Amino acid sequence: MKINVNEQPIELDQQANIEQLLTFLDSPLKGSAIAVNQKIISRSEWANYKLQENDQVSLFQAIAGG
């Protein structure tokens, strides 16, 4: 399955949910925000939200500072 993450093509062996994608990318679950096809997906939905072929995923990391 092919998707784009932050405009970079990624190929997954099988359909995945958002938590599985973050694990695949070695990205932390905490401090992350996800949009799929320009729609923010709430963290409570990550385990159940199945990514689809050609989805456009935007991954944001929280940055502390001031």
Image (spheres, grey):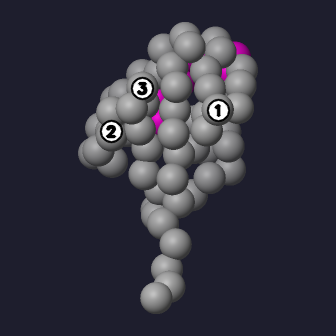
Residue placed most toward the observer, 46 or 3: 3
- Disc ID at residue 7: 1
The N terminus: image quadrant: top right
Task: Name the spot of residue 53 as percent of width and height, x first.
Answer: 55, 11
Magenta residue check for 56: no
Q: Which residues are magenta?
A: 12-18
Q: How many marks?
A: 3
Q: Secondary structure at mark 1?
A: loop
Indicate which label's residue lies in the foreground, 2 or 1. Answer: 1
With respect to residue 64, does 22 lie above or below?
above
The residue that label 2 is drawn on is 41
Residue placed most toward the observer, 2 or 18: 2
Which residue in the rendered view is the most extreme toward the bottom? 66
What is the crowding at mark 1: few (fewer than 14 residues within 10 Å), some, or many (at least 20)?
few
Residue 12's quadrant in the figure?
top right
Q: Amino acid at mark 1?
A: Glu
Q: Earlier in the sequence, mark 2 or mark 1?
A: 1
Residue located 61% across and 44% down the image: 23
Q: Amino acid at mark 2?
A: Ile
Left or right, 56 with respect to 13, comes to left
Residue 64 seen in the figure: yes
